[in-house]
Amino acid sequence: MMIRHVAIVGAGFSGTLQAINLLRHDGPRATLIERAAEPGKGLAYGAAHPSHVLNVRAGNMSALPDDPGHFVRWLTEHGKGDTTSFAERVTYGAYLRDMLDQAIAASGNRLEVRRGDVTDIACDDGGARLTLADGTTLAADAAVLAVGNLPPHDPPGFGGALSPDRYKSDPWDPSVATGLDDGDTVLLIGTGLTMVDIALMLEASGYRGRIVALSRRGLLPRRHDAPAPGPGLPERPTESPADLLRRVRARGEAIGWRAAVDELRPYTQAMWANASEAERERFLRHLRPWWDVHRHRLAPQVADRLEAMRDRGQLEAVAGKTIAAEETPDGIAVTWRRRGSETVERTMFRRIVNCTGPQGDLTRTTEPLLATLRDRGVIRADPARLGIDVDGCARTIAADGLPNERLYALGPMTRGAFWEIVAVPDIRQQTWNLARRLSNAQWVGGEGL
């Protein structure tokens, strides 16, 4: 099929790079549709607080897989850092916006950015027709869902019955830190990277009260250390998950756990693709929390700040489970139980913030576009309910199990197929690959001629 025009839904990191790469491949013209006021940044970089920094060194944060030094050169030109630095997230957002502005200026009308909210996409052999909230439609030969992460689900017992002043279901709500006194206690549900961001933001805003971070295991992300790569693995590991875990532990003793985890990176997508559904389920049930805290690490300066908050007693990380939440005139009373204990505790909190992290379960989403496409059978959830089901070419899979030749998906919502697809190094390669496919003049059955 001939691809002359691609519509991209979402102008965060994935969507912006998809549009830029289509131009770089001299491919079809693109329309980038974004409902937020400012395209090119997305939630990760557009909603970041000035105290938030990247979790990856600048030397590996180029947005372009064929130009690994691109971001560092941009930093140098703007006097903002070097290869080994952990740049501020707002700086990375400015970098992406600068790339988008330059691409638009050089596109010769081949790239259009359109403000709007896509509510439906209809696909047939003739292409894709997108409907926007204002009633207008847009015709394209293919469409790409680049919607980023979905907001977290409310934990059981939390949500609509609680006042929005006291319970923040959206951790990026600008009012999270407002109205707090140092005598208040704040509960952060979750102990991962989102919790770290919110704890640092609360501290940076001047809040000096107590913060309790609660999750089932109470695990905190580990810190980055000086790069110390091991010899690397010559080929993809093929052991069972249990044997692989033993191997990683042994390698960790020999070369350090960071190097033992990092040397798996070139193979993790292939390992996930070759794992059975049962193996994936066991990994998600038992090993995912441990993988996450070792794989997705903190910049040293962030780890230092978090440790200082814990040392002075401002921040406490607790392993446990919430049972119920009841709003009272004084706050929200949370009934909960510590891990390994039968004793039920009841604690009063002035504010509770949902920091459980982004969720991708398509069967539970209320995001209007995805819910509409799901209900019509245009897309379906992947077997692990991590996001949108796609094939190896990023084509979405319909409810009947057939791939959509006109509708693709990118970024974190494709983690069910690729697992490692939430970080810049992985997404930049995914957008590059799809741009190359869509830039092929002729397509037959999803395979480039």
Image (tube, rainbow, N blue to C red):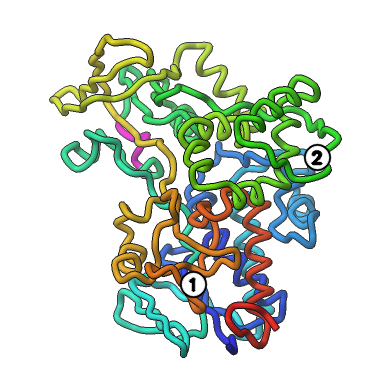
Q: Which mark is residue 233?
A: 2
Instruction: Tell me the kind of residue under disc 2.
Output: Leu
Question: Do the residues under discs 2 and 1 have CB atoms within 8 angstroms?
Answer: no
Q: Which mark is residue 403?
A: 1
User: Furthest-left residue in view?
Assistant: 329
Which image quadrant for residue 231? top right
At which x and y percent is residue 311? 53, 12
- The quadrant of the image that shows the N terminus is bottom right
Rounded to the nearest angstrom, the CA distance separating label 2 from label 1 is 34 Å
- The quadrant of the image that shows the C terminus is bottom right
* Left or right: 333 as drawn, with respect to 180: left
At which x and y percent is residue 420? 60, 48
**Rendered residue at 83%/43% (across/down):** 234
Q: Is residue 287 visible?
A: yes
Name above or below for residue 16 compared with residue 41: below
* Secondary structure state at the residue bearing disc 1: strand
At which x and y percent is residue 274? 62, 50
Main SS class of the magenta portion in the image: loop
**Rendered residue at 53%/41% (across/down):** 279
Instruction: Tell me the kind of residue under disc 1.
Output: Pro
Looking at this view, is 39 or 389 the one in front? 389
Magenta span contains residue 178: yes
**Rendered residue at 67%/77% (across/down):** 23
Which image quadrant for residue 198? top left
Q: Is residue 90 visible?
A: no
Residue extent of the magenta highlight: 175-179
Magenta span contains residue 302: no
Please count the marks in the image: 2
